[in-house]
Image (tube, grey):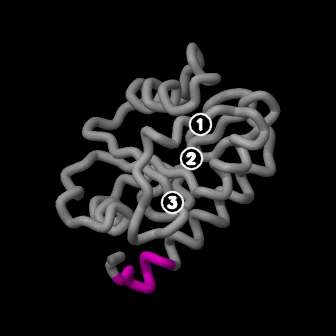
Amino acid sequence: MARHAPIRFLDKVRLVKTAVEIARSSERGYFDFTREVAPSVKLILKEVEHTPIVFSLWTQPTDIAELCGDAAYPATAALLSIDKEQAHEVLRKGVLIDLSQFVRSDSTPGTYYVLFDYLSAQQVTRVLQRLVPALSGQRVAA
């Protein structure tokens, strides 16, 4: 059973979702981190085969615990997420995203996530290259 998420957190999720939709409308030929779109949440932007992909990177421990639905996760450095609709749209366009490496959020339906024990641009690059094989060999702009 999913935990009840506080209204403030749900507002933050909606804000991030809106920022993701706006970011997907712009072209990106390179990896890029945005400034915070909500407190402790940045977007990672990339375009693969003319298909924009936008991940959200969450670093606030209480947000990570909410998304995971478990208070045991605040020791995690970050959480990288993508929403179900975007992931399936990208897959329909022929860009492989390995959803088997993501966990589905019970508390925030329609959200897939990956946890980071350690956060650096290099670590984000390695994980993204594993999740989206077409990104192999590409670097993230810090």
> Considering only vertical position in the picture, is 142 above or below 77?
above
Q: Please state the extent of the stretch shown in magenta in the rendering.
A: 4-10
* For residue 116, side relative to residue 140 (left or right): left
Could you give the CA–CA distance between mark 3 and mark 1, rounded to whole angstroms?
Answer: 14 Å
Q: Amino acid at mark 1?
A: Ile
Numbered tag placed on residue 127 in the rendering: none
Q: Residue at x 44, y 30 (%)?
A: 127
Instruction: Give the mark nearest the N terminus, 3 or 2.
Output: 2
Check if mark 2's residue and mark 1's residue have beta carbons within 8 Å. no
Disc 1 is placed on an element classified as: loop
> Considering only vertical position in the picture, is 80 above or below 9?
above
Disc 2 is placed on an element classified as: strand
Q: Label 1: which residue? A: 97
Residue 14 location in percent, x, y? Answer: 58, 72
Residue 117 location in percent, x, y? Answer: 26, 40
Q: Label 3: which residue? A: 111
| Residue nearer the viewer, 101 or 28 | 101
Whether residue 6 is in magenta: the answer is yes
Residue 58: image quadrant is bottom left
Residue 135 location in percent, x, y? Answer: 61, 23
Q: Label 2: which residue? A: 55
Q: Amino acid at mark 3?
A: Thr
Disc 3 is placed on an element classified as: strand
